Amino acid sequence: MKIIVCVKQVPNTNEIKINPETGTLIRDGVESILNHDDANALEEALKIKDRDPKTEVIVLTMGPPQAREMLEECIAMGADEAVLLSDRALGGSDTWATSNALAAGIRKIGNYDLIFAGRQAIDGDTAQVGPQIAEKLGIPQITYVREFQMEGKRITVQRALEDGYQVLKTTMPCVLTCIKELNTPRYMSIRGILKGAAAEIKVWSAEDIGVNEELVGLKASPTNVYRSFTPKPKGKGVSVKGDTAKELAGNLLAELKEKHII
Amino acid sequence: CPFKAIEKTGDDEAVDLSAYKNVWVFAEQRNGKLMNVALELIGEGYRLAKEISADTKICAVLIGDNIGHLADECYAYGAEEVILIEDPLLKNYTTDAYTKVLVDACHEYKPELVIYGATHIGRDLAPRVAARMNTGLTADCTRLDIKVSSYIEYADKNTTLDTSTLDPKDPSTGIKQTRPAFGGNLMATIICPKTRPQMSTVRPGVMQKRDKVEGAKGELTVYKPQIAESDIHVKIVDIVKSAKELVSLTDAEIICSGGRGLGDPSGFELIKKFADKVGGVVGSSRAAVDAGWIDHSHQVGQTGTTVKPKIYFACGISGAIQHLAGMQTSDIIVAINKDPDAPIFEVADFGIVGDLYKVIPQIIEEWDNAEELYDASTK
Ligand SMILES: Cc1cc2nc3c(=O)[nH]c(=O)nc-3n(C[C@H](O)[C@H](O)[C@H](O)COP(=O)(O)OP(=O)(O)OC[C@H]3O[C@@H](n4cnc5c(N)ncnc54)[C@H](O)[C@@H]3O)c2cc1C
Ligand SMILES: Cc1cc2nc3c(=O)[nH]c(=O)nc-3n(C[C@H](O)[C@H](O)[C@H](O)COP(=O)(O)OP(=O)(O)OC[C@H]3O[C@@H](n4cnc5c(N)ncnc54)[C@H](O)[C@@H]3O)c2cc1C
């Protein structure tokens, strides 16, 4: 059985700062990490491989050359192979164009049974790429997967809803997008780390996967960034005064009353 | 790097865009009940439709089985037209069936804009529909504008954007969709200039419902779907409602949230007492959820619920950007934290530096005496 896991290298958004003068992101010195949900996606694939060692797990990413580091990390966790789609022509893709490129990469890998992705990337934050890959490949999707079971080619999953979950059944191949409730990702092993460092990572260009400027990149993308900016910092509010907890509480309530808030 | 500050004008350059007309809201229903966000979006869609032109209609699209009775509710909240799509195979949401009928209906009636609630269902359906129609989709919007002049007004008031390069008389009627990214560190306004329909998902709790007009009527269009069992590749075996009570954070007027500063799970007993006193709902930070002190359904923030109550009490919450992303548009924020440098004070309207275990019991005790406290303070 062959499983493809879509993984994205993302900046650690906890560490991101904005340059107050230009209003742009400061990326220098910000750690790049494997997107959280994608670690859950990879873990689920690796669990299948634990049960059936003949399973082949291939990680696929689209990104700049330095995404290689993250792919090595995925191999260190236990993935067998890694593919990097990297080409200037792919830059500036929105989710429509990103999913065109990833679907083309998946078709080139071929003969897949399952595709795992994260529900959402913490930088772009759209949660659109998984479903859009499924549409481009013409196969079913199940998003928000919180439990996964497999019997032969049949799979049963729990899909999280806001107020519960659905139990869904489908057959392979299909795309599943994973959330953190699904599992706890494993650590890299020492042997894995050595394997990752030595691994040969396939790098494919737009031409290699047969996509052109009508399908990928900034110009092909139906959405464009019109403007980008940072929210205005709210002015500092009132610091409530008081020497005791009773005074603090009393002064707060008096203020709230005065401003007709309560 | 996928992100460059590429700026484009709002010019609609491609042809035949004018064949597309009207604003659609995917009026999500579950078990024959409309989701709150559907009504919020009808309110927002109404506003957008009127900004586009006087004869642009706001249509609610109802998909399900035996749900005709929901049309009146859509009219009451502002829908001028309801497109009703019913079939036994549409009773419960499936990606395959709903995508097919919504795409077919879009081809038939050609809306210029379709908005969906960013619910677990909306975020499953919208990307699939947008991909099938080869059009753009903007995720998780928190602000929508048609007129450049209203966009400028919004941006000047709430953002650091230099609006001097924008022309308030720009006649474009393409939608400007504003959304947070990078965990709320950056906001982007996204346009979809070349393809139609334009599509967005919108976070629940962000847009305003219109006042309900009992007995309001609109036009009903019944659309006969072409759908067969064989179109549906993912079968629903069961739908399980969680036993836990649903926390309606999005509707709450007052929210009392606790964070890691509570120190241990029993802290939520105090928060619950606080919420009961003030008629509020209990919220939490992710740190408190991760610690296992409270269920995820209470979590406020980027990966929890977005809330906009009249008053948000943040108790023992530091104010991480991901938490702020879910609550900073609350009308009034009150922060109680023992660290005077906690970032939560940067967004708080009222800040109390102190131990929450001392301050909250006093607020509970004095809550009903606010009137007298105010009188005393003015003397
Ligand atoms: C500020 C900003 C706002 C944006 N807003 C929008 C928007 O509203 N609509 C839009 O269409 N585009 C938008 N984009 C562009 C979008 O971020 C990119 O298309 C990005 O490549 C994919 O989207 P995402 O990060 O949201 O991924 P998501 O859809 O959130 O990712 C879901 C999963 O898909 C897989 N995946 C995603 N990207 C890759 C990849 N490169 N390689 C391998 N697997 C991947 C991963 O498994 C991931 O967990 C925006 C970009 C920026 C910078
Ligand atoms: C991808 C991602 C998504 C995330 N999504 C969310 C999200 O949706 N929601 C969210 O909340 N977080 C989210 N986080 C986590 C976020 O970054 C913070 O870790 C989290 O919000 C911290 O929670 P906290 O403020 O309760 O804890 P802390 O940061 O530990 O703050 C505790 C505060 O309590 C104060 N305190 C301690 N004792 C007392 C006392 N006795 N009285 C008064 N004050 C006291 C301390 O001074 C401190 O400021 C996310 C993180 C990531 C990476």
Image (spheres, rainbow, N blue to C red):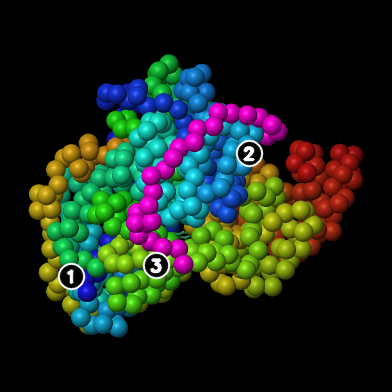
Question: For the residues tagged 2 and 1, is the chain the same?
Answer: no
Q: As drawn, is A256 to the left or to the right of B248?
A: right
* Residue position marked by numbered label 3 in the rendering: A169
Residue at 38% in and 61% down? B234
- What is the quadrant of residue A77 in the picture? bottom left
Disc 3/disc 1 C-alpha distance (Å): 29 Å
Compared with B200, A63 (above or below) is below
Q: Which segment did they paint magenta?
A: B209-237
The front one of B194 and B55 is B55
Kindly identify which residue carries mark 1.
A81
Q: Does the segment drawn in magenta span residue B226?
A: yes
Quadrant of the image containing the C terminus of chain A: top right
Crowd around label 3: few <14 · some 14–19 · many ≥20 (10 Å): some
10 Å crowding of disc 1: few (<14), some (14-19), many (20+): many
Q: How far apart are marks 2 and 1 (CA)?
A: 54 Å
Label 1 resides on the chain identified as A
Disc 3 residue type (three-letter): Lys
